[in-house]
Image: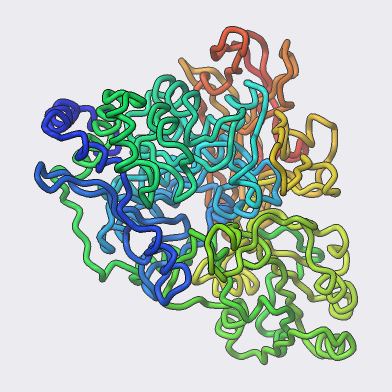
Amino acid sequence: MKATKKYRLKYTDKAKKIVDELSLEEKVHLMSGTVSLQELLEHAIGANHYNYYPYPAGGNERLGVPQMKFCDGPRGVVCGTGKSTCFPVPMLRGATFDVELEERVGNAMGKEVKAFGGNLFAGICINVPYNPGWGRSQETYGEESFHIGQMGAALVRGVQAENVMACVKHYAFNSMEISRFKVNITCEKRTEREVFLPHFKECIDNGAASIMSAYNKYNGSYCGHSDYLLNKVLKEECDFDGFVMSDFIWGIKNTEEAANNGQDMEMCCTQFYGEKLVQAVKEGKVPEEKINQAALRIIRTIISFGDEDDKIYDESVIGCKEHVGLALETARKGITLIRNKNRVLPMNREDAARIAVFGKLANKGNVGDYGSSRVFPQYVTTPLQGIATVAEKSEVIFYDNTDMEYAKKLAAGADYTVFVDGYDHNDEGEYISEEQLDGYTNAMGGDRKDSLGLRKEEIKLIQEVGPVNKNSCVVLIGGNLIMTEEWKDYVSSILMAYYPGMEGGRAIAEILFGDINPSGKLPYAVPFKESDLPQVNWNSETQYYDYYHGYRKLEKNGIKPYLPYGFGLSYTNFSISDAVFSVEENLIKASCKVKNTGAFMGTEVIQMYVGFKNSGIDRPVKILRGFKRVELESGNEKEVAITCPIDKLKWYNPKTESWELEHMEYEIYIGTSSDDNDLLEGSFKL
């Protein structure tokens, strides 16, 4: 398969011969995006939209080197209007804990890229949200580096199986939106290596063809100019053999710094490369060997994916029935039930003659932010449409205003009440200021600056109307955790639906009525207080990232979360027993028996954690090191085994600048969430 390094390296000699035949100007052309800034601005404010067609770069017709043709993501392929399949955002896909499913999603996205005429998909976003208020949290898979790496690598494999290059972004430390163009991130070396970079290495080891550098600075250098990040870590230590591209327009600030320090391609407009880079070489400011190296990487990667390409797709695959069905399947598997007092859910159709639905988001096709990840599908099924379709014999009453007395009257007269609350693109998402794109008028949300909770009016409605009807459910829409402390006790049940894609409304309704048994698991922990999370100044020129965040921070500080990492309810019950732990060759292994003890078929996600109580250094209480979904009919039992390479237990020693394994007794856990009460414990020695 062309995704592997071994395959691509076969093309090194062929690529070198091509480089030797190129003039300096032709080599630099390979390193340059060919979309004009004016054209990009016209897309931003005109009838078309950003990335309406695949954005080209480089190419050499004389010597048969194809252009790189860029398509953005990660909810689907951004190109076209009213065509692409809009999948749920990666945060929901992370909640599936299903790497096989994510690989199939990658297959579908790769096919649609090719059908649009592209050959590169830049939809593998694997940044760690240091704080869940980050506006683009929805584009990544959760808070846990190991989990992000496994899911991102699956998407890489799926996309590249279709002979489409996968571009992984944003390298690195990009977890602030409003300040992303100016902020300087700092952290300790262990934090860098153990928390913010391992998932990039996982994607590289799985064959990722391209890496996109980030806008922000790291330790004083722009990531797009960083010799340390691009050359030392990425190309030397991680043995990355593909090419690096800049983030768009503002990803490069200086010709010489970028070219000398490992930036292979400027996207998507040529501002600092092109003629400026040719002149810098002629003046001796950039060695031509740097240009040769970049040209080699670009040519080798592109021709390796294009050679003997037998994957041909026409526009009939774009938004096809199979892909839309896959989007629905993904939403069904990721939507997470986090509260179900008195088993109010699933709703009983026979007792649901009248359903009252509240909240503006119930009647909105809300699939995520309006930045570079915005996908334009044929349609979007709203929660209201989904409920009306699935409960076709029920009277569904929709109310989106704040007249409390009228809302209470509706709730009192209904058999069930559903509140759909949360966020949309105005609240969170990619941020670009008006100064950066003159005349750009689309609202972009940025980070959640004020709170991680609902709006005051939404909270008030839930608090006053929720208790009127004991058969009540809140459906939450958003890209990361939403605080529930102020209102959770006023309703019976809560579903976290994230941004569930073009068929999300249908999936929500199917889960509400029990046609689908929920199986999503939270890819983050939910604290009782926002103050228990890492604190971030969203509009800042400096930000320090600590070693601990998310569930690791809560556990280290002895703080019990409201909802643990990996938590999610089902309409059935599961028991786990007979845990066995072992070390086999270079692997640790945990297994247990899982039994469905309830009345419905259902799916559980078994998780493996490793603990470090005997460590001589500062380490987390425990860390996730494996997971697996298991589907069981009522009454059935199955043994589930999870393995992890011993290498993934190493810590980074900044004094020796190397990864080291502690020889000691480790704790090992297997169960259904990070909470100790949901885990069986054992130990092993290394």
Q: Is residue 382 left or right of residue 549?
A: left
On-image quarter of the N terminus: top left
Write down the quadrant of residue 286 in the picture: top left
- Relative image position of residue 82 (x, y in whole percent): 39, 76
Whether residue 213 can be seen here = yes
Relative side of 51 to 578, left or right: left
Quarter of the rendering occupied by the C terminus: top right
Q: Which residue sits at x=72%, y=71%?
A: 421
Residue 250 or residue 503, whichever sits in front: 250
Q: Is residue 296 left or right of residue 527?
A: left
The answer to which of 343 and 332 lies nearer the viewer is: 332
Q: Residue at x 59, y 59 (%)?
A: 435
Residue 571 visible in the snapshot: no
Does residue 266 appear left or right of residue 88 in this picture? left
Taking 368 as reference, is 420 above or below it?
Answer: below
Please identify the quarter of the rendering in which residue 506 is found. Answer: bottom right
Quick check: 399 above or below 455? below
Percent x, y for residue 391? 60, 84
